[in-house]
C-alpha cells in the first residue's frame, strides 16, 4: 500500500462541559484518506511526551464503501481524546491492517484558550475578548513589556468570562514591538497566553529609535532602548539630506543598554545610526529646533563613586578623568563633506 493513501492528519481542540463549572478539554482528530481496496480502517493514537501514556481509537470503513468509492477521498473523524492545557502530545495515524512505513505523525501542543483582540490606534487602546469559561469564571488580562520578564504596564484587569461581552479595553501610551497582551485563568498555576500585537509592526519598530535626547548643560546626547535590541549604535555624519551617513571612528556602542555621548557639538549633520538584525536607521536630532531634550529635569552625571542623579541646573560638565568608560569625546575634527 502506498503512503499516498494517507493524505492529511488534522488535530483540533474542543471543550466539553457537563455543567458550567465542570469542563474538560478534548483533542479531535480528522484524517483525509484515499480509499484503497485493502484498507479496512484507521487507527489514531496520542502519546503524552511527559508521561509516555498512549491512547488509541479506531474507525472502520464499511464494506459497501470499498466497492463504490475506491480511489476517492474520504474524511474520517475520531472521537475526542481527553487532554490537559499545555500538554505535549505526539499524534499518530496508521492504517488497519498496518502497512510498514504507511503512517502520519504530528507533534501537537495543547495551548490555553486564545485571546481575541483589536487595536484601536486612534484611541490608543487594545480591545480584548477573553475565551469562554473553562474551569474558572474569571480571567485576568494585562499589558506588559516583554523584557527579561514581562513587566506590568498598568494593573491586571479581572474579567468575568461567563458574561455576554467578555471584553475589556486596555489603554497604552506607546506602540512598541515588546508591548504584549497576556491573559490567564484565575486559577492557581494557570498557563498564560501571550500575544504581542506590534511585534512585526514597522510603525512600532520605527518608534524604538525616536527616544534620542540632548542635555545642553552637559552636552550629552543619549538614547535608551524601550525594548530589548541586539545591534550597535554609532555617531555618523550626513553632509546633505539624502546622502549616506558616514560612521565616525571609535563611536560604536552596543545597543542593548543606555548609550551616551558627552561633549557633543550640536551640528545639524551629526546623527545617530542604529544597526540591528532588523535593518539600519538614522536619527539626526540637531536638524530640528528646539532639540529633543530630557523628558524630566534630572540627568545622570558622574561622581567619584559612579553615577548619581542631580538637578539639571546643578550639573556641570565632568572632568575628563571622571568620564564613564562608554563615553566618546568628540574632540576630533568633523568631516567637511
Image (cartoon, grey):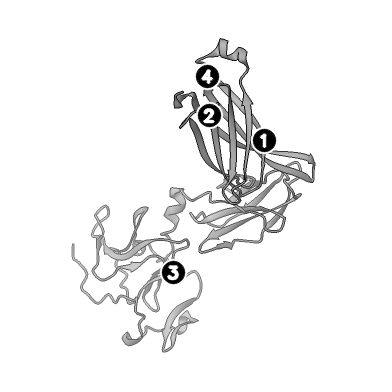
Residue under numbered circle 1: 80
Q: Nearer the viewer, mark 3 or mark 2?
A: 2
Crowd class of label 1 (few under 14; some 14 to 19; many from 20; radius 10 Å): some
**For residue 182, what is the image quadrant?**
bottom right
Cα separation, mark 1 vs mark 4, equals: 26 Å
Q: Secondary structure at mark 4?
A: loop
Residue 293, labelled with which disc? 3
Cα separation, mark 1 vs mark 3, equals: 61 Å
Residue under numbered circle 4: 38
* Residue 213 relative to residue 106: left or right: left
- Nearer-N-terminus badge (1/3): 1
Residue under numbered circle 2: 98
Cα separation, mark 4 vs mark 2, equals: 10 Å
Crowd class of label 3 (few under 14; some 14 to 19; many from 20; radius 10 Å): some
- Nearer-N-terminus badge (3/4): 4
Q: Position of residue 226 (x, y in %)?
A: 47, 62
* Residue 175 relative to residue 21: left or right: left
Crowd class of label 4 (few under 14; some 14 to 19; many from 20; radius 10 Å): few
Amino acid at each position: 500500500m502506498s503512503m499516498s493513501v494517507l493524505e492529511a492528519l488534522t488535530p483540533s481542540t474542543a471543550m466539553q462541559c457537563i455543567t458550567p463549572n465542570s469542563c474538560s478539554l478534548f483533542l479531535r482528530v480528522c484524517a483525509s484518506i484515499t480509499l484503497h481496496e485493502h484498507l479496512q480502517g484507521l487507527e489514531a493514537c496520542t502519546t503524552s511526551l511527559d508521561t509516555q501514556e498512549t491512547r488509541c481509537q479506531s474507525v472502520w470503513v464499511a464494506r459497501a464503501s470499498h466497492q463504490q468509492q475506491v480511489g476517492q477521498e474520504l474524511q474520517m473523524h475520531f472521537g475526542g481524546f481527553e487532554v490537559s492545557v499545555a500538554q505535549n502530545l505526539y499524534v499518530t495515524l496508521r492504517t488497519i491492517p498496518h502497512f510498514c512505513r504507511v503512517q502520519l505523525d504530528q507533534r501537537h501542543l495543547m495551548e490555553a484558550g486564545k485571546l481575541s483582540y483589536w487595536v484601536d490606534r486612534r484611541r490608543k487602546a487594545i480591545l480584548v475578548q477573553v475565551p469562554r469559561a473553562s474551569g474558572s469564571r474569571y480571567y485576568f488580562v494585562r499589558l506588559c513589556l516583554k523584557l527579561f520578564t514581562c513587566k506590568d504596564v498598568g494593573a491586571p484587569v479581572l474579567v468575568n468570562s461567563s458574561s455576554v461581552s467578555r471584553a475589556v479595553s486596555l489603554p497604552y501610551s506607546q506602540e512598541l514591538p515588546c508591548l504584549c497582551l497576556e491573559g490567564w485563568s484565575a486559577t492557581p498555576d494557570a498557563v498564560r497566553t501571550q500575544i504581542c500585537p506590534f511585534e512585526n509592526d514597522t510603525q512600532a519598530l520605527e518608534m524604538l529609535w525616536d527616544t534620542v535626547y540632548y542635555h545642553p548643560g552637559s552636552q550629552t546626547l543619549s538614547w535608551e532602548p524601550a525594548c530589548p535590541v541586539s545591534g550597535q549604535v554609532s555617531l555618523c555624519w550626513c553632509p546633505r539630506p539624502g546622502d549616506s551617513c558616514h560612521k565616525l571612528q571609535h563611536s560604536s556602542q552596543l545597543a542593548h543598554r543606555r548609550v551616551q555621548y558627552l561633549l557633543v557639538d550640536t551640528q545639524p549633520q551629526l546623527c545617530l545610526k542604529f544597526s540591528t538584525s532588523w535593518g539600519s536607521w538614522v536619527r539626526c536630532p540637531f536638524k530640528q529646533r528646539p532639540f529633543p531634550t530630557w523628558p524630566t529635569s534630572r540627568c545622570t552625571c558622574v561622581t567619584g563613586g559612579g553615577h548619581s542623579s542631580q538637578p539639571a541646573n546643578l550639573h556641570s560638565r565632568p572632568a575628563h578623568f571622571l568620564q564613564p568608560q562608554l563615553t566618546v569625546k568628540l574632540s576630533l575634527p568633523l568631516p567637511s563633506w
